[in-house]
Amino acid sequence: MLARTVNFIRLLRAGYVMAREGVFGLVELPDLPAGPRMALRIIRLLERNAARSADAGARISVAFNRLGPSYVKMGQFLATRPDVVGREVAGELSQLQDRLEAFPRAEAEKLIREALGAPIDEIFAAFGEPVAAASIAQVHPAEITDADGVARKVAVKVLRPGVARRFARDLECFYLAARLFERFSPASRRLRPLAVVDTLARSVELEMDLRLEAAALSEIGENTADDPGFRVPQVDWPRTSKGVLTMEWIDGRKLSDVAGIEADGHDLVALGASVIQSFLRHALRDGFFHADMHQGNLFVDEAGDLVAVDFGITGRLDKAERRFLAEILFGFITRDYMRVAEVHFEAGYVPKTQDVAVFSQAIRAIGEPIHGQSAADISMARLLTQLFEVTELFAMTTQPQLILLQKTMVVVEGVARSLDPDLDMWRTAEPVVRGWIERNLGPAGKLQDAGEALSTMFRLAGELPLLAQRAERIIDGIEAQNMSGVKVEPGLVQDWKQASRKNNRLATAALWVIAVSMAAIAVQGWW
């Protein structure tokens, strides 16, 4: 009871801070019932004069940063859930970036000592002041000496002291708020507030283990090893633990410094295209993408390559979801709206009770206007946003992984257009999308799918004798021990054995026939 009271007081404080900074002023009054509308009008009396004149993004940023790391992370998470907070608020929250005060270097050195089990001067040849501070961790420059005696600069990411305890405390408040919403607002139950907080809690739990970020860096590094114009920092695994991540130091300019990048002689148009194409390669080809690709997490190095950092938030798409994305984008590029509609139904995202022809008509209403616009006016991110708005009319269920993808696409497109305002999104995306479709949905893709099916068939054929042996042992056990008094008719056990052996032989033969037939079909399709 005491803990619940304390959490309620904390929620009241959070509400007061948001009221002072004008966050509640972003809620549209006509959309609310009479009671909440009156309460909101009273709360707005607490707004500071300066907050009233600030734009929505500034109000949210100031309030959430005042409330601390947990609320910043909650805001960033809710930016991926426009189905919960609305698309306009989600758009404002997507601009929310971590800008917290750094904690002292001495505290960071203590945490590193505890995490890596050695004095700081034994781990690093030099260790500097923090250069970036976020809600969960901050980054320090450092130097290490290689085995051959060569000094090398590295970046050291260190978890904030007490961050796990702070998040655990604030998550209790979030859970209380979610329960209150579900109790007093029946309409909110459809959005499952408790499930939203559950997802946030899991996301934060993963993000606070820096070994997982190191693993994401390593995986994307392998995926992109041969990609033109893109790379990620290498991980220094011996100096990495749950609370410390050591990686290659990146010398370069952030993509937010457009003037500096141009002064360095880099091709802004080529960089803009590289941002889009790199993201699409990761999402379509690899099914694993950086889900926080804002300008502060992207650098241009001396060679003109893009370098991505901060992999605390990533997204995954399985093969079916990648096919869904590729066929939708390609359908809009080629104006094949019926195919776009069919893909939604094939993926199971739109119920079969809906009319595919009517749905295709709605898709056409989105796609046709973009073909009459100039390259600078065509937005792939806006198209995906409109697509999800239309699909709501056809009872499409929420797909969190696709919402995260769409949110990331909005950010990536914004970064690319900051480099090249006249970027032709479709012409830039087309080679990557077409290439994926040709590799995965053309003859080569069909052969690969057939190969995977064949592999499964062969594995099943190999396992059938083992399964038959297990069945026979069970039958022998029934015969020997009468299975705790189970009555078995004379001769029935022998009949079971004979049937089991016969079925095993027939099933194995059938699997081999199917496998050979599929191989023949695949070869015929290839030629």
Image: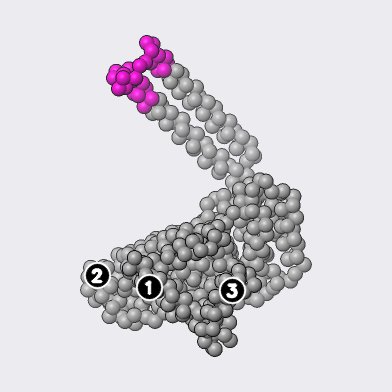
Q: CA distance from mark 3 to mark 2?
A: 52 Å
Q: Residue at x 31, y 80 (%)?
A: 105
* Disc 3: CA contacts within 10 A as few (<14), some (14-19) or many (>=20): some
Q: Residue at x 42, y 64 (%)?
A: 175
Q: Which residue is mark 3?
A: 37
Secondary structure found at label 2: helix
Q: Nearer the viewer, residue 316 or 334?
A: 316
Rendered view: 380 above or below 96: above
Answer with left or right where residue 119 lies relative to residue 405.
left
Secondary structure found at label 3: helix
Query: In the rendered structure, which segment of residues is drawn in magenta?
Result: 470-498
Q: Which residue is mark 1?
A: 137
Residue 426 percent across, percent down from the top left = 67, 64
Secondary structure found at label 1: strand
**Is residue 216 at all visible to an observer of this figure?**
no
Q: Amino acid at mark 3?
A: Arg
Q: Nearer the viewer, residue 444 or 242?
A: 242
